[in-house]
Image (spheres, rainbow, N blue to C red):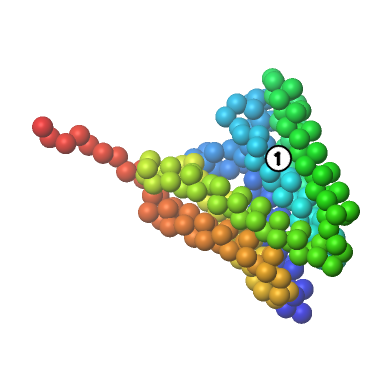
Amino acid sequence: MATSVLAGLCLAATLAMFATGLRPLPPALPRSDLRQMLATKSVENIQFLPFLTTDANNVGWLGYGCLKGDGTLITVNAIGAALQTLYILVYLYYSPAKRPVLLQILLLLAVVVTGCGYFALLVDTGTRLGRLGLFCSVFTITMYLSPLADLAKVVRSKSTRCLSFPLTVTTFVASSSWTLYGLQMHDPYITVPNVPGVVTSLVRFWLFRWYRPGQDKSYSPLPA
């Protein structure tokens, strides 16, 4: 019963996190990347690499879910991979320099095919699940820790305008749900990589409390 409840919570929270990235945000917050590309018909100031890495991460966890027979992992990461692929196609469509984008997409496909071949042909069946879980865990932890530079930027600028509060809330709920789900399933490969998501979300909550949007601290010149 508890496992079913947690599985449903994980699914709902992760889908809410996806929806937060797609829906229009308040004017004081930056648009989601997809909405910005569709609205401006441009990819200016939008990084392409996060789309690729997130897609690869979803594909990895999708493979892990299939090996383990975990329907929750399969459903969530299948939707995530589909959305990231949509972002990639929209970026390619609006990108003025399509050759570098195509080369990066081909590189992603090569990495995915190579990974599938490695785990399917070269890794023993008994250790395949563990090795894939370890790879996915390390990759996910790296992705959660990569935005730390943005948090440092918030501290330096004393402004949280570059952060999305709804996305922070949904990320916290999703990461917490997956952490509890991993504990319930006794799967450290699910539990461990979601802990940094909880921690970074708490840091963002603290930043929102300390540097409230619309109340950015200003400095007056010191008297000579």
* In the image: residue 215, left or right of residue 32: left
Classify 76 as above or below 5: above
- Please name the residue shown 64% across and 49% down the image: 20
Residue marked by disc 1: 52
Q: Residue furthest left?
A: 224
* In the image: residue 153, left or right of residue 89: left
- The image position of residue 115, as x and y in percent, is 80, 48
**Quadrant the N terminus occupies:** bottom right
- Please name the residue shown 52% across and 61% down the image: 199
Q: Nearer the viewer, residue 28 or 131?
A: 131
Classify 196 as above or below 22: below
- The image position of residue 82, as x and y in percent, is 79, 45
Q: Residue furthest top?
A: 96
- Please name the residue shown 64% across and 41% down the image: 50
Asked where in the image residue 30 lies, by quadrant, the reply is top right
- The image position of residue 187, as x and y in percent, is 71, 71
Tell me if residue 177 can be seen: no
Q: Nearer the viewer, residue 197 or 35?
A: 197
Residue count near mark 1 (Cα–Cα under 10 Å), binned few <14, some 14–19, many ≥20: many
Q: Nearer the viewer, residue 106 or 58?
A: 106
Asked where in the image residue 194 lies, by quadrant, the reply is bottom right
The amino acid sitting under disc 1 is Leu
- The image position of residue 65, as x and y in percent, is 81, 61
* In the image: residue 28, left or right of residue 132: left
Q: Residue furthest bottom?
A: 1
**Quadrant the C terminus occupies:** top left
- Please name the residue shown 49% across and 44% down the image: 150
Tell me if residue 156 can be seen: yes
Classify 222 as above or below 206: above
Classify 46 as above or below 185: above
Asked where in the image residue 76 lies, by quadrant, the reply is bottom right
